[in-house]
Amino acid sequence: MVIERGVVPDVWSYNILIKGYCKINKVDEAKNLMKDMFRKNIVPNIVTYNSLVDGLCKAGRISSVREISYNILISGCCKNKRLDEAMNIFRGTTKYSDSSFMLSLTSLVSN
């Protein structure tokens, strides 16, 4: 990536890459980029989520869409100071997979 040249990617750089990977049906690479965003404290925006959800739906990966949707709900609840509701949703996500747990936990902690 361009980091080697001293250019630090922002949310828009990631959005372009995520959308591109989804268009060529490489949704796992797109998901990995989103995980990389979280590791680097780069906050995904609506474009990030829409691109990934669209790519996952087209690839027939509905369970992965569910994970992302829960993450969006938890983040929204936290931002609106509805922590009890966020925790209830979080408890429901842990039954799906480790990745949904980690994304949801990131939302709870960062808000």
Image (cartoon, helix red, strand yellow):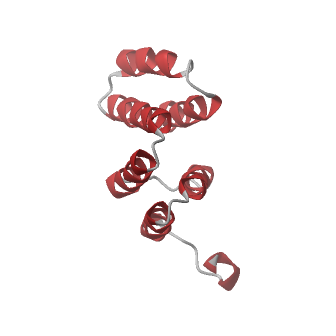
Horizontal placement of 54 versus 35: left or right? left
Q: What residue do we see at 48% from left, 62% from top?
A: 18
Answer above or below: position of 39 versus 99.
below
Q: What residue do we see at 49% from left, 30% from top?
A: 108
Q: What residue do we see at 43% from left, 52% from top?
A: 52
> Which residue is most to the right?
4
Which quadrant holds the C terminus? top left
**Which one is nearer the viewer's eye here, 103 or 111?**
103
Q: How many labels does the image show?
A: 0
In percent of width and height, residue 9 lies at: 54, 71
Answer above or below: position of 33 versus 66.
below
Horizontal placement of 62 versus 1: left or right? left
> Which residue is most to the bottom?
5
In percent of width and height, residue 11 lies at: 45, 63
Answer above or below: position of 2 versus 92.
below
In percent of width and height, residue 49 lies at: 39, 50
Q: What residue do we see at 40% from left, 45% from top?
A: 57
Which quadrant holds the N terminus? bottom right
In percent of width and height, residue 104 lies at: 51, 31
> Which residue is most to the left?
80
Q: Quadrant of residue 89?
A: top left
**Which one is nearer the viewer's eye here, 43 or 52?**
52
